[in-house]
Image: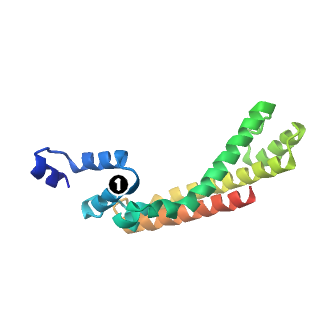
Amino acid sequence: MAKNLYEAIGYDMTPESLRYIFNAYLMGPLQGIMSAMEADNFYKPAYESNRSAMGPGVTAIGGSILYSAPQNIAQMLFSSTKRKLEDEFLRRGVKVSHPDNKSDEKISFATRNMRNAGMTEEQISQYKTILEAEAELNKLDNEFRKKRGPVKWTDEAAMKRLSEEYVQKRQKILADAARKI
């Protein structure tokens, strides 16, 4: 595309600069241009985004937004519930992190302080779910780092497989937590 731009109007631009501009400024149906550009092997990343995998036509009509929406809803619900609870902790002066930062005592410490501050059982249950999900996410992150360590970044198939497995497990943890919240 950079070569075509140079031939058409004489403006010399690196392919990376063009890609940056398109990623930064194209929105909605115009994202199809970026998907078409990424179809070139030169731009193939180690793993494909939803937008790249679906192709320029589906992306141009908004298909990638519809596909990723359910996955984003769990993350948004999880984050917004956590933020609301943390705002409530600040308002009431509730201390939820253990003084010694011991993760095994974190839930009981937080639960006790939340009850003492008069928070509802629903709020306590939501926060316990959040803490449990965060512990699972931390464990998943550590496992991913260990698995990723011996894999060479040049082995695209292995990196893609590891990344997809990680994303699926992460989304499942968030979706399960969102259902409980």
Picture quarter containing residue 86?
top right
Q: Nearer the viewer, residue 101 or 123?
A: 123
> Would residue 53 be found to the left or right of residue 169 on screen?
left
Q: Dot 1 lies on which element? A: helix
Q: Nearer the viewer, residue 116 or 50?
A: 50
What residue type is disc 1 on?
Answer: Leu
What colour scheme governs how the chains and residues are painted in the rendered image of this protein?
Answer: rainbow
The C terminus lies in quadrant: bottom right
**Structural crowding at the residue carrying mark 1, measured as other residues with C-alpha within 10 Å and reported as few (<14), some (14–19) or many (≥20):** some
Residue beneath the point at 58% across and 64% down:
169
The N terminus lies in quadrant: bottom left
Q: Position of residue 106 (x, y in %)?
A: 77, 45
Residue beneath the point at 50% across and 64% down:
67
Residue beneath the point at 30% across and 45% down:
21
Q: Nearer the viewer, residue 106 or 111?
A: 111
Residue beneath the point at 61% across and 51% down:
76
Residue 47 visible to the viewer:
no
Residue identified by numbered label 1: 30
> Would residue 67 be found to the left or right of residue 124 on screen?
left
> Would residue 57 be found to the left or right of residue 111 on screen?
left
